[in-house]
Amino acid sequence: MDKFEKIVNRIDSFRDEMIDMQIRLCSLPAISPASGGEGEAKKAEVLLNFLKENQFENIQVLKAPDLEAPAGYRPNILALYKGKNSTKTIWIMTHMDVVPPGELALWDGDPFKAWVEEGKIYGRGVEDNQQAMVASLYALKAFQAEGIEPNYDVGIVLVADEETGNGKGIDFVLQKSAPFRKQDLIIVPDAGNEDGTMIEIAEKSILWLKFKTIGKQAHGSTPEKGINSFKAASFLITELTKLYHIFGDKDSLFDPPVSTFEPTKKEPNVPNVNTIPGEDIFYMDSRVLPRYTIEEVKEKIGEMIDKIEKEFKVKITLEEDQKAPAAPPTSPEAPVVQALKRAVKEIYGKEGKPTGIGGGTVAALFRKANFEAACWSKVDDTAHQANEYCIIENMMGDAKVFAHIFLQE
Ligand SMILES: [Zn+2]
C-alpha cells in the first residue's frame, strides 16, 4: 500500500468521528453579534482542543476585540502541522461563524441539533463552512495516525466574522500577523459546485446602486399637476438595460460569462392607488467583469440619468450601496490551481475548471494582498438555506483531496 492509500483508508476510518465532530460544532452556534449571536469563542475552544490533541504546532489565537461579544473578542486561530519541508506552506482557511437559522418553521429539525439522514448531515453551518473545516482537520489527523509526514508544512487558519464582513476575521489576521508567503498555496474551501470541478480564481466587481427619483406628488386624476417619479424611474430602468450592450464583453472564465446589471429592490412609494408618486427609490445590483472599471460604468449611468432628468423634468440622485472593485484574479496556471486540479482528478476522476464568479469570496482579500488563493470544495450549495446539509461523502472526499495535495511534490 502506498502512502496515499494508507491515508485514504485512515480518513475512511474516521467517518463516524467526523460526523460526531460536525454535530458537536453545530451545537455551538457561532453567530456573529452583528446578527444577534455571541460569536465564535465556544466553538473555538473545541477546535483548539482538537489542535492541541493532534500535534499541531505554533498554535496562536488572534483575538479581535469585540465588545458586543460576551467573550469580549472574536477568536482567529492559526496552527501549523509540520511537514518534511518548510520552504512553502499549504494553507487551508475555513470560517467558524455561521449565519442565523432564519425562519425556524422552514426547518425539519432543530438547526443546532444536527441530525443524519440518508448520507447527509443537516444543521446550520454543516456545509458552510464546517464540511471543509472538519475535512481538513481529519486529513491531518490521518497523517498523524499513520506516522506519515506531509511533503510541506500545512497551515490551518480558522477565522471569525466571515459572514459579516471579515473585519474581525481574516482582515484582522492579515493586519496583525504575516504568516503567508508568496510561494505558499492558499486554499479557501468555501465555494464550489456539485461535482467538485469548480476552482474559483476570479470574481467580478460588485456595484450596488440606489436611485432616488424626485418628481412632484399630485392627485391620481390630475397627473398634469404633478411629475410621476415612478414613471420616470421605470424609463430609467429600461435605459439601464443598455448597459448589457455597452459593457457587453464575454469572458468564458466566468459563470455567467457577462457583466450583469439588474434592478432589484424597490422601496414602497405611495400607499394608495390614487396618488401620483412624487418620490421613487429602486436599487440595482451590478456584477462587472474585471476588464471594466466601476468608474466607467458609473459614468455611463450618469449620462442615462441626465437624459431621463431632461425628458421627465425629475431630479435623480445616485448613491453607492456597496462598491467592491474586483481583486486581481489568481492565474489559472498558479500552483494552487494546479495542485487542486491534480487532486480532484485523482479523487473524483474529473477535470477541475478554473472559474470566475459574480459574488465576492474571502479569497479576494488574499488576492488584494497579492497572494494567489483559490476556492474549492464539493458542495450542493445549501449554505444559508433552511435544512442546510452536508453530504457525508463530500466531507470525506474534501479530506482526501486535501490529503492528496499535502503529499504532492
Ligand atoms: Zn462560508
Image (spheres, helix red, strand yellow):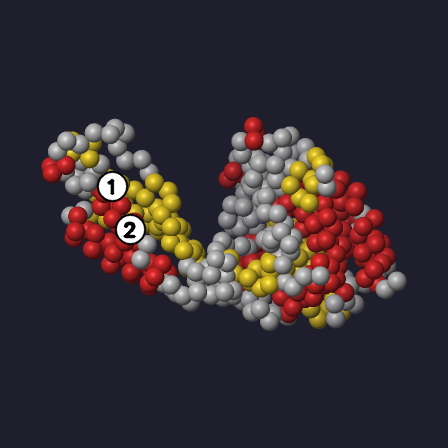
Q: Position of residue 261 (x, y in %)?
A: 38, 54
Q: Position of residue 29 (x, y in %)?
A: 62, 37
| Residue positioned 48% across, 57% down in the render | 256
Circle 1 packing at 10 Å, graded few (<14), some (14-19), many (20+), is many
What label does residue 164 carry, if any? none
What label does residue 238 carry, if any? 2
* Quadrant of the rendered image containing residue 173: bottom right
Nearer the observer, 348 or 55: 348
> Which element carries disc 2, helix, strand or loop?
helix
Q: Is residue 253 visible?
A: yes
| Residue positioned 26% across, 50% down in the render | 236
What label does residue 230 carry, if any? 1
Residue 282 in the figure: left or right of residue 339 = left
Tell me which amino acid carries mark 2.
Thr
C-beta proximity under 8 Å, tags 1 and 2: no
Q: How far separated are the C-alphas under marks 1 and 2?
A: 12 Å
Quadrant where the C terminus is found in the figure = bottom right
Q: Is mark 2 within 8 Å of ligand 1?
A: no
Tell me which amino acid carries mark 1.
Phe
| Residue positioned 71% across, 71% down in the render | 87
Residue 156 in the figure: left or right of residue 235 = right
Asked if residue 3 is positioned above or below residue 68 in the image, the reply reads below
Asked if residue 28 is positioned above or below residue 14 in the image, the reply reads above
Q: Nearer the viewer, mark 1 or mark 2?
A: 2
* Quadrant of the rendered image containing residue 66: top right
Nearer the observer, 315 or 261: 261
